Image: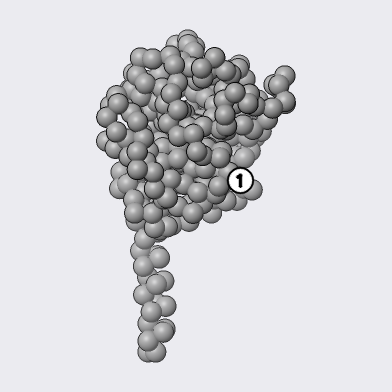
Amino acid sequence: MRFTSFLLLVFMYNSIDSSAQVVAPGAKLRLIDSSFAFTEGPAANKNGDVYFTDQPNNKIWKYGTDGQLSVFLDEAGRSNGMYFDAEGNLVSCADEQDELISISAEKKISVLASHYEGHVLNGPNDVWINRLTGGMYLTDPYYHRDYWTRTEPDAALGGEHLYYLPPGKKELVIGDSSLKKPNGITGTPDGKYLYVADMGDSKTYRYNIAPGGALTNRQLFANESSDGMTIDNKGNVYLTGKGVMVYDSLGKKIAQIDVPEQWTANLCFGGKDKNMLFITASKSVYIIETLVKGVE
């Protein structure tokens, strides 16, 4: 065997082996439903039920561990990215009124944040919660909505920022003001690292989370951005856009999951064993079985 051929075989083996660490052997992407307008914001509760949004239709749906779809909430504030807090409340980026809201299991809604220093936010997009402390990280890019009366962002905000809401507080603080258009966000369950995608710069960054919630030591993680993100129990980070791109904790791409839609917006792990990757992709939602498990 020629040496170059040997190297090619080694590369192919490593690629296949890496992908096999994520997707279960023989698992295929399975379509759940394709009757939505645009799906976003999947988040799993402690039981493994997945809640997701059909943002243009202003609904939050539930995909239960029994495989059944049902509407959880009508008139959902145009919810986008969502995440469950430690108490089981569904925290949502509701950009109808540019608010971060909390939805209880009884569907009672309370507003957590809506302004920065008196100025209306651009449009809360995605959120991650450090369940150890209760601190929340919020991305606030500007994507114009036809249901807004305003036609441009409030210049007083000074840009499209990453914000932090300290536990028990109502006032946001800036986590990073240097991003162009922050979007997808996730973090590690030990509360040590935060991952944030910058759609305006086509990059994803990793931060250290300091005591008190401040972000330090920003480093480039991947040379591509992401609409939504999640993380598994091996520390792999899942980015979305043209399918699903999986990176290990060192920032090496180890897998690609192709999705037959123009755009993949977000994803999370659900199911009773948290080993079902739930993917929101334009008008459809999909699942695929994995060898890894979610940590959310």
Residue drawn at the location 38% of the way across and 31% of the way down: 48
> Quick one: quadrant of the N terminus?
bottom left
Specify whether residue 55 is in view.
yes
Residue 223 drawn above or below residue 160? below
Closer-to-camera residue (230/183): 183
Position of residue 268 in the picture relative to residue 199 (left or right): left
Residue 256 on image: x %, y %:
48, 56
- Residue type at mark 1: give it: Trp
Image spot of residue 186 (x, y percent): 41, 37
Tell me the residue at 69%/27% (across/down). Answer: 152
| Quadrant housing residue 77 | top right
Q: Dot 1, how many residues are within 10 Å of its Cα: few (below 14), some (14-19), or many (20+)?
A: some
Residue 18: image location, x then y, percent: 36, 60
Q: Residue at x 51, y 39 (%)?
A: 179
Q: Nearer the viewer, residue 139 or 267?
A: 139
Please give the residue where the numbered disc 1 appears in the rendered image: 263
Q: Is residue 181 left or right of residue 90?
A: right
